[in-house]
Image (cartoon, rainbow, N blue to C red):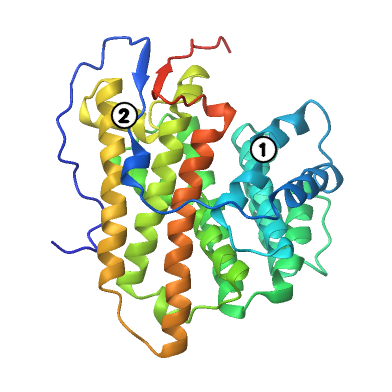
Amino acid sequence: MDPTTPVMSPTVTHTTNPDTEPSQFILPDLVNDCHYPVRKNPHYYAVSRASDQWLADVAQLVEPEIKEYIDIDSGAYVALCYPDADAFHLQVCADYINWAFVIDDWMEYGTVDVREAHESCILALRDPINFETGHLGAKMCKSYFSRFKETAGPGCTERFIRGSESFFVAVAKHVDDRAKGNMYDLASYITLRRDTVAMRPCCSLIEFAAGIDLPDEVVSHPIFKAMEDAANDHVSWTNDIFSYNKEQSRGSAPWENIVSVLMHDRGLDLQGAMDYAGQMCKDAIQRFESNCAILPSWDEEVDRQVAIQVEALQNFMAGNLHWHLDAPRYGAKPDRIIQLLPKRLL
C-alpha cells in the first residue's frame, strides 16, 4: 500500500437505515486510537486571560458576544496543542485561534463580506505594521501577525500567509455553495475541509512556536505533505464528529459535516456514519505514521527540525482531541452516549 494515498475506505460494518430518526448516538472511541501523550502548557492560565482581554481590546467584542468566545477557551486549546511554547509564542497562537473562530463566524453568518474580509486580512498579513484598515478582522491580523513576524522565519511566514489565503478561498466557496444549494460528495468535502479547518496556518504556528523554519524542499516533498494532510484530516474529522450534534440542531446543510456527508454519500444512518468517521480518524493516524516512517533524510539540522515538526503534529492531534472531549460546548461524557439535541426553529 502506498502510504501517501489520500484516504482509504474504512473496513468496518455499517448500518444503512438513514430514514430512522434516532434519539441518541455513541461517539466513536477516538482516544483509544490516538495514543500520543497529552500535555498542557504551563503558561495556560496567564495566556488565556490575556487573549480574552485581547478579544475585548482589539476585536472590540462586548457582552453577550464576547462571552461566547471566552467560553470556547481558546487558551486551553493552544495549551494542549502547543505544550512547549513559551508565553509570548503561546499568546500569538491563542490570539490567532480566537481570531479564526471570530472571523469564521462573521463570514458564515454574513456579519462581514467574505471577499472584503479576505482582501483586508491578507493585506494586513502582508504588511501588519504599515497597512491601515478599519476592518476589525484585519486589525486583529495586524495585532497577532506583527508579533508573529518578530521571530518567525521567512519560509514559515510565507506559508502562514498562503495557508490563510487557502482558508479564505475555501470559506468563500463554502458560503457560495450553501447559497446555491450545492452538494458535496465525500472526496470533494475532504478536499475543502482541509482548508476550512485552518490547519495549514496552524502548522506554520508550530514552526513559529518551536523556532524552526523548514526548507521548501521539505514541506513540498510528497511524503511530508501526505503526513501533514493526514494530521489535518484527523483534526478536521475529530471536530466534525464532536460538532455534529450542535450543527444538526441549528439546521446546518447536510453536507457541512463529515458525518452528514457520510450519511448522504454512503447511505448510512447516524450511528453508522459516526462509526465510519471514527474509523476514518483511525486510518488518518495510520497514514500519518506510515508516512513518518518513510520520510527521507536531508541533513542533520533539517532532520532535527523535521523531527520537531513531527512530534508537534502528534501533540496537535492529541491536544485537539482532548480539548473537544473536555470542552463543555460539546457535551462529551465518559460513556460517549450523546442525546440528540432537538432542531431549533430559525
Q: Closer to the camera, 332 or 118?
A: 332
Residue 106 bears which disc, if any?
1
Q: Closer to the camera, 219 or 79?
A: 79
Three-letter residue code for mark 1? Trp
Instruction: Classify residue 249 as left or right of residue 46.
Output: left
Instruction: Classify residue 90 as left or right of residue 294.
Output: right
Q: Where is residue 225 in the image (x, y as percent from the top left)?
A: 36, 67
Pointers 2 and 1 in contact (C-beta within 8 Å):
no
Indicate the quadrant containing the N terminus: top left, top right, bottom left or bottom right.
Answer: bottom left
- Residue at the image point whose x is 45% and y is 32% from the top: 242
Spatial CA distance of label 2 from label 1 is 29 Å
Residue furthest bottom in the image: 299
Three-letter residue code for mark 2? Met
- Residue at the image point whose x is 75% and y is 30% from the top: 67
Instruction: Classify residue 248 as left or right of residue 329.
Output: left
Picture quadrant where residue 147 is located: bottom right
Q: Earlier in the sequence, mark 2 or mark 1?
A: 1
Q: Mark 2 or 1, which is nearer the eye?
A: 2
Q: Position of residue 71 (x, y in %)?
A: 69, 32
Categorize mark 1 by other alpha carbons within 10 Å: few (<14), some (14-19), many (20+): some
Element at badge 1?
Answer: helix
Q: Closer to the camera, 230 or 290?
A: 290
Residue 274 bears which disc, if any?
2
Indicate the quadrant containing the C terminus: top left, top right, bottom left or bottom right.
Answer: top right
Picture quadrant where residue 124 is located: bottom right
Element at badge 2?
Answer: helix
The correct choice, above or below, for 345 with respect to 89 in the image is above
- Quick check: can you spot residue 77? yes
Categorize mark 2 by other alpha carbons within 10 Å: few (<14), some (14-19), many (20+): many
Q: Position of residue 332 (x, y in %)?
A: 47, 26
- Count of numbered circles in the view: 2
- Residue at the image point whose x is 72% and y is 36% from the top: 70
